[in-house]
Amino acid sequence: MRSRGFTLIELVMVIVILGALAAVALPKFVDLKADAEKSVVESSVGAIATARMLFVTKAAACGSSYASAPIGVFTFLHFDNNNSRAPTCDDFTTGFGSVTSGPVGTMDLKGMKSGIQANPDDNLTITSASGADVMSFTSKTGRTVSISVNVTSGAVSWSATPSY
């Protein structure tokens, strides 16, 4: 009578093959969180650039000097500290008042804040240096992410430490 089943060598070979596959595939899945964070940052940078362009366009249509003046991050992202609203032509002629603190308003960057910011309730840190406004925060993976807007050219860039 012949016994049926797998030999020890066949079982060991299957285990070795599965181990090799896991060794190749596992690092791909481990880095998915960082890849997702990077994608959210990149989409937020695009949204910031679009918001700035819309602000400049509306300013030009309203006949405001804001269209040609250096425009900081708060000017186009945070039009109203209390109401989080889009600017009207009246805003461009009467001015936006003092907007110096609080969470980023109109655009709010909710996807970025809730998606990757370590504590979504924290305000974004805003600083101005070397002709650029910089928003920074700590991500869930412990990276310090900085999004920089050149106030003269409007160029938007970002960096992360450590990098993605």
Image: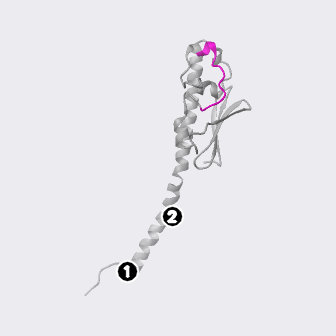
Residue 64, relative to residue 21: is it above or below?
Answer: above
The quarter of the rendered structure image containing the N terminus is bottom left
**Residue range (magenta):** 91-103
Q: Residue at x 58, y 22 (%)?
A: 55
Q: Closer to the camera, 23 or 91?
A: 91
Residue 31, relative to residue 12: is it above or below?
Answer: above
Residue 38 rendering spot, x and y as whole percentages: 56, 44
12 horizontally vs 163: left or right: left
Q: Which residue is mark 2?
A: 23
Residue 85 rendering spot, x and y as whole percentages: 53, 23
Q: Residue at x 55, y 23 (%)?
A: 54
SS at badge 1:
loop
Please count the marks in the image.
2
Residue 102 rendering spot, x and y as whole percentages: 62, 31
Q: Closer to the camera, 33 or 24?
A: 33
Q: Earlier in the sequence, mark 1 or mark 2?
A: 1
SS at badge 2:
helix
- Give the spatial CA distance, label 1 vs label 2: 25 Å
Residue 80: quarter of image: top right
Q: Closer to the camera, 117 or 53?
A: 117
Residue 76: quarter of image: top right
Q: Residue at x 59, y 31 (%)?
A: 104
The amino acid on which the numbered mark 1 sits, given as a three-letter code, is: Thr
**Residue farthest to the left, as pictured:** 1
Q: Which residue is mark 1?
A: 7
| Magenta span dominant secondary structure | loop
Q: Closer to the camera, 136 or 123?
A: 123
The amino acid on which the numbered mark 2 sits, given as a three-letter code, is: Ala
Let me know if residue 14 is in the magenta part: no
